[in-house]
Image: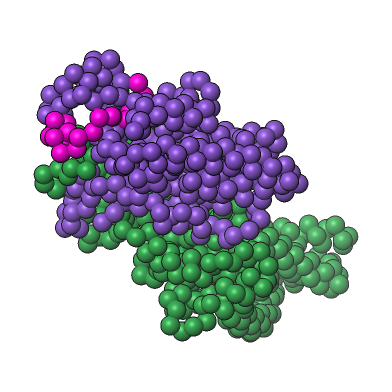
Chain colours: A green, B purple
């Protein structure tokens, strides 16, 4: 029998037993692909988070867990409990040649984190608008590429911030936000967030608000007879912008964190040194260093996954050999018929080898496809998983 | 509780002293000032090296103007934004501008800023009542404070145009001389008499009064709008306790107002323009000098 005939019969046999073929290809694909996918995804994720951490020289946040601060500030995980006052940051950077970018990560919009910051954040992260422009005033926001795509919103649409909690039925109405732009995709957590000016975040906090004008006294210095209760405005627009204002001491306004970009390493050391006092309200962390601890855990998990997949691969190989042996037994009549009609033993062996070659090649292709897919979407899926937990 | 200005604090947060610009700036976007005096100071210091822009239209008071979206876009690409501080242009707290490029020109004399009396009190639910207490923002009317603001502008421009520092300093010295001469003229003017009693159509002359020992009682009267009878009655009560012979106006009052002041109260009016916006003729300096000349009648012994 010619080689072409053997290949023809092998393919015909695989097509005849489609379900069995599919199961075997999938099994080979998953077993071979799992370690590849794990390695590729973790490598890409490690690279992505390391790059983000490297672009963030120093993080100042409230005293407490470094990992929480890192995840909240770098990966934009809203946290309504931990914050530090602005003056804790200003005191740490006073007289230091450094740019400081505020981060207010407390609220959400349609489940996505709402990040209050300033224009410096977009510059630091290299973010630009694919549509529209950056926030212009209180009540404005820009949305990440994925938020825009998933919600089907764009510039000139509006969103409403999520109420604080399901039990907040008294005053927890959301604040209307005008979308001024959609950020270009960056394959980072910024794609899955909504950004506004930190002052807008403080309006949502209730620190800033707008209300109808009070009738002014004709003589400067006189005070109207009685205080009046004024309903707060639920959103900012061009008409009522001027009626918004802030109360309280701005130095006490809350931030989740602040990114400090020192002009030099020595300036950075000054900032970090000022926050080593255990009595200080804030702590300064170097994200790359804090990340090492996190990555150590990731690497350990990767090691465990590798070990498990190795065991799985051995078991699967044994299973495949067993399946092959059983298949040969089931096909005894078929193979005897081939021998009876004059097919040589070598050709019959070639037929079986060809079938398994096809299966292994198809399984290998599946593993490759899985690996490529993981490179494209794996990091995003992993980030989404981490964000949801 | 007080309504407070956020930008000085956030501006400090955004950028430490001497921090270099962290991104390239568009040279065509220029330097922006929030009022005309600052534009005048900056343009005189910068000369032809850059264009100092001032976005408010000519027919509005820049202190109470609000920028449109296109104005804010222009500010977002500005190289430098010169703020007056002292709660001037409150819109700056309501918009998103590059804080690291803002300069609060009154920061050096923050402790000398004058507070205005409360104008209104209100409350929000259980948070208690609070009054909107204002800061007098007309700092540039006092030549001494104007000199400090000009010095702040010079420092910012030298940082921005280090290659032209020598020329900028020379221009600033000439400006400082002019402002110092205004101060001298005011001192000489005020030295001839005891603290004169004055009325003012608006509370804009606080720094001049404090600097040169004037006793000024301010109203909220517009030059072109005839006050209501209730306002005249309130005015009568004020005049009975504050026997002024002159009333300072930000602009020429309507003839019927001037006539009633003269006939019913024996009060003459004198125009001393704050010059927050670009004057119809001349510039900041000529307007200040013209105001000084008009004041000579008031301060005749």
Q: Is A241 in front, or is B8?
A: B8
Going 44% across and 79% down the picture, which residue do you hit?
A280
Which contiguous range is marked in magenta?
B234-252
> Residue B178 lies in magenta, yes or no?
no
In the figure, A361 relative to A206: above or below?
A: below
Residue A169 position in % (x across, y down): 20, 56
Residue A146 position in % (x across, y down): 52, 50
Q: Is A303 in front, or is A57?
A: A57
Residue A330 position in % (x across, y down): 65, 74
Going 66% across and 39% down the picture, which residue do you hit?
B171
In the figure, A351 relative to A121: above or below?
A: below
Instruction: Locate residue B135 relative to residue A183 in the image: left or right.
Output: left
Going 80% across and 60% down the picture, which residue do you hit?
A7
In this orientation, does residue A48 appear? no
Q: Is B231 in front, or is A319?
A: B231
Quadrant containing the N terminus of chain B in the rendered view: bottom left
Q: Is B135 in front, or is A46?
A: B135
What count of labels does the image hold? 0
In the figure, A272 relative to A125: above or below?
A: below
Going 51% across and 58% down the picture, which residue do you hit?
B12
Residue A135 position in % (x across, y down): 48, 44
**Residue found at the far top of this picture:** B255
Instruction: Locate residue B166 relative to residue A274 in the image: left or right.
Output: right
In this orientation, does residue B63 appear? yes
Quadrant containing the C terminus of chain B in the rendered view: top left
């Amino acid at each position: 029998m010619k080689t072409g005939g053997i290949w023809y019969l092998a393919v015909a046999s695989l097509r005849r037993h489609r379900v069995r073929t599919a199961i075997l290809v999938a099994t080979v694909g998953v077993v071979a692909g799992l370690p590849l996918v794990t390695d590729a995804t973790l490598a890409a994720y490690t690279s992505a988070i390391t790059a983000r951490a490297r672009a963030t020289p120093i993080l100042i946040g409230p005293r407490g867990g470094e990992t929480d601060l890192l995840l909240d500030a770098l990966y934009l995980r809203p946290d309504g409990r931990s914050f530090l006052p602005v003056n804790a940051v200003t005191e740490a950077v006073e007289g230091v040649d450094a740019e400081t970018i505020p981060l207010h990560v407390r609220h959400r919009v349609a489940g996505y984190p709402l990040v209050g910051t300033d224009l410096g954040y977009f510059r630091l992260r290299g973010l630009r608008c694919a549509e529209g422009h950056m926030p212009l005033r209180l009540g404005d926001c820009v949305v990440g590429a994925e938020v825009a795509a998933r919600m089907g919103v764009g510039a000139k649409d509006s969103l409403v911030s999520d109420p604080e909690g399901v039990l907040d039925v008294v005053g927890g109405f959301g604040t209307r936000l005008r979308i001024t732009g959609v950020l270009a995709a960056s394959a980072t957590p910024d794609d899955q967030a909504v950004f506004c000016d930190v002052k807008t975040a403080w309006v949502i906090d209730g620190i800033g608000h707008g209300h109808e004008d009070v009738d002014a006294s004709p003589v400067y210095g006189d005070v109207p007879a009685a205080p009046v209760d004024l309903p707060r405005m639920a959103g900012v627009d061009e008409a009522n912008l001027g009626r918004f204002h802030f109360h309280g001491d701005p130095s006490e306004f809350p931030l989740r964190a602040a990114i400090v970009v020192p002009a030099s390493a020595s300036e950075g050391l000054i900032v970090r040194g000022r926050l080593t006092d255990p009595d200080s309200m804030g702590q300064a962390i170097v994200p790359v260093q804090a990340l090492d601890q996190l990555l150590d855990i990731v690497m350990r998990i990767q090691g465990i996954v590798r070990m498990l997949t190795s065991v799985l691969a051995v078991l699967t190989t044994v299973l495949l050999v067993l399946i092959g042996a059983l298949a040969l037994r089931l096909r005894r009549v078929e193979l005897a018929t081939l021998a009876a009609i004059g097919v040589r033993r070598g050709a019959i062996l070639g037929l079986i080898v060809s079938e398994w070659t096809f299966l292994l090649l198809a399984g290998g292709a599946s593993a490759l496809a899985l690996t490529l897919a993981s490179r494209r979407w794996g990091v995003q899926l992993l980030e989404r998983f981490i964000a949801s937990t | 509780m007080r309504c407070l200005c956020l930008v000085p604090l956030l501006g400090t947060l955004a950028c430490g002293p001497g921090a270099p610009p962290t991104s390239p700036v568009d040279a065509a976007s220029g330097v922006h000032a929030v009022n005309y005096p600052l534009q005048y100071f900056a343009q005189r210091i910068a000369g032809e090296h850059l264009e100092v822009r001032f976005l408010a239209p000519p027919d509005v008071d820049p202190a109470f103007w609000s920028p449109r979206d296109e104005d804010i876009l222009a500010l977002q690409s500005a190289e430098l934004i010169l703020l007056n501080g002292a709660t001037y242009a409150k819109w700056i707290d309501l918009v998103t501008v590059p804080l690291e490029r803002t300069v609060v020109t009154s920061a050096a004399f923050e402790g000398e800023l004058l507070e205005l009396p409360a104008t209104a009190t209100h409350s929000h639910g259980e948070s208690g009542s609070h009054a909107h207490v204002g800061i007098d923002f007309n700092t540039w009317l006092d030549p001494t404070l104007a000199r400090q603001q000009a010095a702040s502008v010079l420092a910012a421009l030298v940082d921005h145009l280090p290659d032209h520092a020598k020329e900028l300093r020379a221009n600033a010295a000439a400006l400082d001389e002019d402002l110092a001469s205004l101060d001298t003229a005011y001192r000489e003017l005020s030295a001839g008499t005891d603290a004169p009693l004055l009325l003012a159509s608006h509370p804009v002359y606080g720094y001049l009064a404090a600097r040169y020992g004037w006793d000024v009682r301010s109203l909220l009267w517009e030059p072109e709008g005839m006050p209501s009878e209730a306002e005249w009655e309130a005015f009568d009560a004020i005049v009975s306790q504050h026997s002024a012979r002159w009333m300072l106006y930000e602009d020429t009052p309507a003839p019927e107002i001037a006539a009633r002041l003269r006939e019913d109260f024996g009060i003459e009016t004198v125009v001393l323009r704050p010059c927050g916006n670009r004057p119809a003729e001349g510039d900041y300096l000529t307007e200040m000098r013209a105001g000084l000349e008009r004041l000579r009648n008031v301060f005749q012994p």
